[in-house]
Image: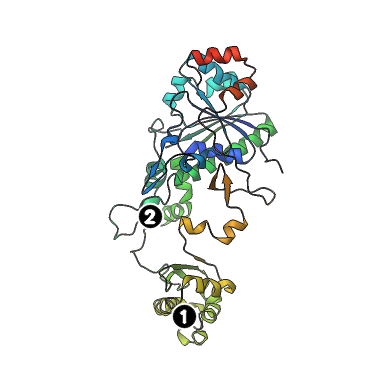
Amino acid sequence: MTSGPLEGIRVLEVAMYGFVPSAGGVLADWGADVVKVEHAVNGDPQRGLRQTGTMRVEGDPNPNFEHANRGKRSIGLDMSTPEGREVLYELAKRSDVFLTSFLPGHRRKFGIDVDDVRAANPKIIYARGSALGPRGAEAERGGYDMTAFWSRAGTAASITPPDVEGLINPPSPAYGDTISGTNLAGGIAAALVKLGRTGEPSVVDVSLLGSGVWSLGHGVALSAHLGQPLAASATGTHGSPVNPLVGLYRTADGRYLSLVMLQPGKFWADVCRHIDRPELIDDPRFATGELVAANTAEAVEILREVIATRTLAEWSERFATLAGPWAPVQDSLQALDDGQIRANDYVVQAGGLRLAASPVQFDVRSPASGPAPGFAAQTEEVLLELGLDWERIIELKTAGAIT
């Protein structure tokens, strides 16, 4: 089996919930040895997250925890004790990356801020995930992906149609967390390259707010240039006012096809042949790309009527040879059975669960994910690697410094 590109890199993770741990999960997928520090008694609160919307998980394994914590080792440590902090610094000495989600006040309180960790290991890369960024009046405030990524950075307002009261929620728990975590993992990888090239360790910062702005980047650029906000169309509006081949079409079984053919003149004839309406190719209303655009409303009505006559499965078979981009609209359960997703191993087996694979592949292979660790399951193993003997480990347990 091919080693991951970060084989031999050691990451010390002091983080909770979804965002920063998902960065650690990606680094573990890439081959790093990620040691997750959890509270000696309570562990990562994400372990107890069972209810997400209408979905509830009973027992273990818990997908809410496994997704972001795949392939790590867990140590239970009380950083508020001198003995616990001593162990943490010893772990930092043998680590290449320190990864944390703790707020500035808590980093100072527990002695895990940049200067504290660098005192133990001057060459360590210090990576922070925050809600609102490391600068500004609100840098000390916390937040979640629903607040900082989804609501504040602009996505929620941009996708909520004007006829919908309130706002559309994120499509998945930890949606912004997972995107932001991948950004943070990429930043850490770049910092490792710099460290190897120059010997200079970096402080890496990624925030939910900044990731939300970046994810909406095309729209942000348009808003800045045109001086107007992105606004969703009313429910049921066709996808483009000047292109019948960009939008959703309902099939006979109540499913939907998504067409995204940005050059209608190029693809119109092929679409007409695939829907058994070749006479529309020479229809004077649609004879050129400009005319197709000008008569979008009429073309949309024709396509809606025709596509409503067959099921999604029938159209999928028929459109297999369609030149322009299209896709079936699928929910998260349907996506699991998608042949292309299976062929590329975009869903992997880890810890008795099927999990979304982290998105970067090396050498045309999906990352080999391992299960998330049990709470504090590798505490003794990690401490023995540090050179502590069993007598010292028992002393730390007695002092309450470790689980």
Q: Are the residues at dot 2 and dot 1 in contact (C-beta closer than 8 Å)?
A: no
The percent coordinates of residue 103 (x first, y second) are 43, 29
Q: Quadrant of the N terminus?
A: top right
Disc ID at residue 158: 2
Please tell me how crowded label 1 is: few (under 14), some (14-19), or many (20+) other residues with Cα within 10 Å: some
Query: Which residue corresponds to mark 1?
Result: 291
The percent coordinates of residue 82 (x first, y second) are 49, 13
Left or right, residue 3 beside residue 250: right
Callout 2 amino acid = Ser
Disc ID at residue 172: none
Q: In terms of image quadrants, where is residue 339?
A: bottom right
Query: Which residue lies at the image location 51% right of the left edge and 36% below the top edge?
Result: 21
Please tell me how crowded label 2 is: few (under 14), some (14-19), or many (20+) other residues with Cα within 10 Å: some
Image label count: 2
Query: Which residue lies at the image location 47% right of the left edge and 61% below the top edge?
Result: 330
Q: Nearer the viewer, residue 109 or 387?
A: 387
Q: Which residue reaches farthest right?
A: 1
The percent coordinates of residue 284 (x first, y second) are 47, 87
Q: Which residue reaches farthest front?
A: 59
Q: Nearer the viewer, residue 39 or 4?
A: 39
Callout 1 amino acid = Leu
Task: Give the foreground label among 2 and 1.
Answer: 2
The percent coordinates of residue 132 (x first, y second) are 42, 37
